[in-house]
Amino acid sequence: MSTEPLIYDLGRPGRVGVPLPEADVPLADIPAGLVRDELDLPEVDQLTVVRHFTRLSKRNYSIDENMYPLGSCTMKYNPRLNEDTARLPGFAAGHPLIDPELAQGSLALMFQLQEWLKEIGGFAGVTLQPAAGAQGEFTGVLMIRAYHLQRGDAGRTKMLIPDSAHGTNPATVTMAGLEVIELPSDANGNVDIAALKQVIAAQGPQIAGLMITNPNTLGLFEEQLEAVVGAVHGCGGLVYGDGANMNARVGIARPGDLGFDVLHYNLHKTFSTPHGGGGPGSGPVGVAARLVDFLPGPIVGIVDEGTDDEPPLYGWVTPKHSIGRLKAFHGNFGMHVRAYTYIRVHGASGLRANSENAVLNANYLLSKVRGHYHVPYDRLCKHEFVVEGVWPDAPGVHALDVSKRLIDYGYHPPTNYFPLIVHEALMIEPTETESKETLDGFAEALITIAAEAHSQPDLLRDAPHNAPVARLDEVAAAKQLVLCCRPTNLAEPA
Ligand SMILES: *Cc1c(COP(=O)(O)O)cnc(C)c1O
């Protein structure tokens, strides 16, 4: 741990950030209990506070500093124009309970975003409510279940999920009260068709559907997608698309055209809204015609078509067999404004170019590191690829060591140990917003680290060497949050 002083230790009695003038009105007693004297807050001047928080902020790593090759997460640049539009007072200051007639601009924006996401995915309806991809998955699986139940088909309680899937897929299915059947992948990284047909032959009438990611989490396009979708539809199941990897295919291949019944978009991945600690997510869901009536409500609709002189009137409508409300109010509206801006700025050809460049960048990077790292499923990749962070002739070095060493070279590590079907996986996604020079620099770091793994393995095993904290117990850090800067205080009785 760094030995930087805590802000508490920087305080000096009587030092203040904002000096107030002497009171020129009679003093009144503050009601008991309002001032908590026991808090022992530091007394500090403004400059000390500014320096303290600036120092802390510099311990963070962000896309604004350097490349963030975190596979599956699509850490692309967040255009500043998105921030400007999201801050326009008409959008930012609207209250979610305002009368729709007074919020026509915001509703028109949401309506247009729904229309664009329908067009991009090839779908008949869209909800903007879900707050993240995982909640979009939950929404989609609940709709699939409601669809079967509404037709009196109550026995469909099982969901097929390939073994390369993101962990949220099986978690979603379990939360929705359904049962997971895991599908193996074949030697090329596709769904094993023979295994799929076997499961369907044995349990067809119990299958609610399939959740599939395309391109999958190996960054590979499912080569037999039509056969997979056909087999699932053939037994009466529906197909859920995990759209987290849409950045490889916007403007190129529409999931709806490929037979998907429902798909979530991650606006914070594909459509450049901020990500993780940078802001709340948004996971809109698109559906084919047969699921439109089950969408969560309310969604934005046109309640009065208007005339040549009058614009249409937008309002809230709830679909006939709606599964209900998924999120307070109307989703993370600020994200809708950012994604709307992004789509509007790029237009159809720009969105397609972004996907093409994302795929080009990933293949360029793969071509540079191939030969230095083992590529388990080595074929043309989409927007990301997976290599192994181990070498038979460098025993004792693991993917985690490669990741930690990358921090010394100034890069955020790639996704580690996912997908689970690759031993010692390093999953790398450069995105379209990185320049050739940046990709070259990152490839150079990876290649140097591969050489160090053989010549000086301890350099990797002891890495990172210059970070404020080195190797953390990541499970404890997530499960036993310590939010107090003086953790010992936690142990004292209140
Ligand atoms: C990110 C991701 C999800 C979950 O999305 P969140 O917005 O993080 O909830 C699901 N599947 C895949 C493949 C992902 O990469």
Image (cartoon, helix red, strand yellow):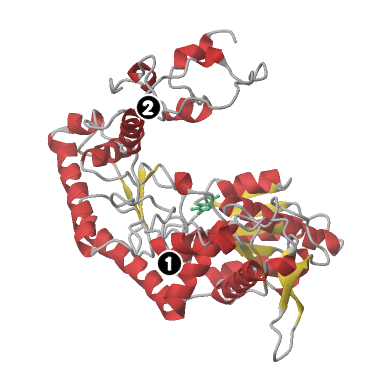
The N terminus lies in which quarter of the figure? top left
- Apparent side of residue 18 relative to residue 362 in the rendered image (left or right): right
Which of the two residues, 11 or 364, is positioned nearer the viewer here?
11
Position of 12 relative to 297 (above/below): above
- Label 2 crowd bin: few (<14), some (14–19), many (20+), radius 10 Å: few
For this orientation, the residue located farthest to the right is 152
- Apparent side of residue 330 relative to residue 206 in the rendered image (left or right): left
Residue 85 image point, x, y percent: 49, 64
> What residue is drawn where x is 38% and y is 50%?
70
1 and 2 marks in contact (CB < 8 Å): no
- Pointer 2 residue: 472
Position of 40 relative to 238 (above/below): above
The type of residue carrying mark 2 is Leu
The quarter of the displayed image where residue 368 is located:
bottom left
The quarter of the displayed image where residue 247 is located:
bottom left
- Apparent side of residue 28 relative to residue 404 in the rendered image (left or right): right
Residue 26 image point, x, y percent: 60, 23
